[in-house]
Image (cartoon, rainbow, N blue to C red):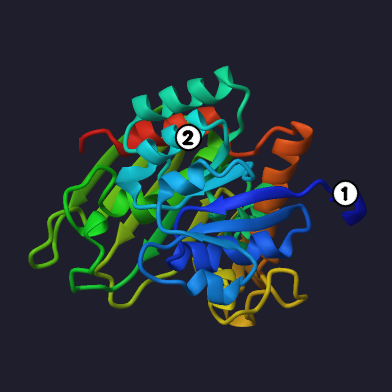
């Protein structure tokens, strides 16, 4: 990171101040010396002004987008509005950071990327789980080669929420609704960042909750070169979740809970630049089991890597100010959306 004295702050506007704005964006903008949170949209409340009294509070997204002071707009509105709001921000000549899922369709995403490139604007997708403790731990294990040739990787994101939630855009048949667009987009992005586009994939989903309208269960089987199989499962009806990460290779197995402490720490107002931020509890460590040549097995605990979602904002800063490549690429997002919008097969 550049020295603080040399940083030219990026002035940021935030489109919403629900959980995502309050937990995943504003604290990180405040913690990074290269950003300044200048404006927030809240239609009926003023919670952001209570938390950040020096900002401008807008009740209209149009007013936010047309604020000439702002250089970066964060689109954290409901999924089905991402395309519309990103397009408007790009037309106002703003750089844009968009929450996942980027858009509902591959074609919408392609169009937005083309507009951004044509106007020399930075368009980035907020895939914060690439910076989570569990995924950083997985990357370290895979990069070490200790598991030998990979056979299968199983990733699960389970919850138990039998009741239909109050957010209509998540529970009704809006574009980009359903659990694969919600939780599944996190894991699918991680897998694509590791292995790229699969040779082939199989997708299935279902609606199991009473009065449910959109899928609350989803499963993807992705097939990669060298006989690597990746299985992604997301569910809203898992009462007793099993470990979310299970990786088998020819020389061993790695098992770990699918968890990250940064969200709950942010909710509890622990700041991203505090020393304890991103450090997992020992109970969430991974278990590595290796097969020895004599037929025996050895197992050891693997502490989780320190989560670093603040690193995403550092990558945003470097991309805008110094034209450093953003690690979540256009190509990866287009692959993700091609899979998410495909029919079950």
Asked whether residue 13 is in view, the answer is yes
- State the image coordinates of residue 222 (x, y, percent, origin top left): 39, 38
Residue tagged 1: 2
Residue tagged 2: 333
User: Which numbered dot is residue 155?
Assistant: none
- State the image coordinates of residue 198 (x, y, percent, origin top left): 44, 31
Where 335 sits versus 148, above or below?
A: above
- Mark-to-mark CA distance, 2 and 1: 28 Å
Helix, strand or loop at label 2? It is helix
- State the image coordinates of residue 154 (x, y, percent, origin top left): 43, 54
The answer to which of 227 and 222 lies nearer the viewer is 222
The answer to which of 41 and 97 lies nearer the viewer is 41
Identified at 76% across, 49% down, the residue is 9
- State the image coordinates of residue 205 (x, y, percent, origin top left): 21, 49
Q: Residues within 10 Å of mark 2 (few under 14, many from 20)?
A: many
Helix, strand or loop at label 1? It is loop
Q: Nearer the viewer, mark 2 or mark 1?
A: 1
Q: Residue furthest top?
A: 118
Query: For residue 223, which quarter of the picture?
Result: top left
Identified at 42% across, 44% down, the residue is 62
- Classify residue 195 as left or right of residue 229: right
- Classify residue 152 as left or right of residue 240: right
Identified at 75% across, 33% down, the residue is 324
């Amino acid at each position: 990171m550049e020295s603080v004295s040399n940083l030219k702050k990026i002035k940021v506007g935030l489109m919403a101040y629900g959980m995502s704005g309050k937990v995943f964006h504003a604290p990180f903008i405040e913690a990074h010396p290269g950003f300044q949170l200048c404006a927030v949209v809240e239609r009926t409340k003023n919670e952001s002004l209570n938390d950040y009294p020096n900002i401008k509070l807008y009740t209209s997204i149009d007013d936010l987008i047309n604020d000439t002071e702002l250089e970066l707009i964060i689109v954290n509105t409901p999924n089905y509005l991402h395309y519309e709001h990103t397009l408007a921000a790009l037309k106002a000549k703003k750089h844009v950071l968009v929450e996942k899922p980027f858009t509902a369709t591959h074609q919408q995403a392609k169009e937005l990327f083309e507009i951004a490139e044509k106007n020399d604007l930075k368009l980035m997708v907020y895939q914060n789980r690439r910076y989570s403790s569990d995924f950083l731990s997985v990357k370290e294990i895979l990069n070490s080669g200790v598991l030998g040739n990979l056979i299968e990787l199983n990733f699960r994101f389970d919850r138990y929420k039998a009741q239909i939630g109050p957010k209509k855009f998540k529970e009704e048949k809006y574009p980009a609704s359903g659990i694969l667009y919600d939780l599944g987009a996190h894991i699918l992005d991680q897998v694509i960042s590791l292995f790229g586009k699969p040779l082939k994939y199989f997708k299935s989903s279902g609606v199991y909750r009473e009065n449910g309208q959109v899928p609350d269960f989803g499963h993807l089987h992705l097939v990669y070169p060298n006989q690597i199989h990746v299985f992604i499962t997301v569910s809203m009806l898992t009462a007793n979740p099993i470990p979310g990460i299970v990786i088998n290779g020819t020389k061993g197995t790695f098992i770990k809970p699918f968890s990250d402490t940064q969200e709950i720490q942010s909710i509890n107002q622990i700041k991203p630049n505090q020393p304890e931020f991103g450090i997992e509890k020992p109970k969430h460590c991974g278990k590595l089991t290796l097969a020895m040549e004599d037929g025996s097995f050895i197992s050891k605990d693997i502490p989780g890597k320190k989560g670093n979602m603040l690193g995403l904002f550092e990558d945003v800063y470097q991309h805008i100010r110094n034209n450093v490549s953003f690690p979540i690429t256009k190509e990866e997002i287009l692959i993700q959306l091609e899979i998410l919008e495909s029919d079950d097969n």
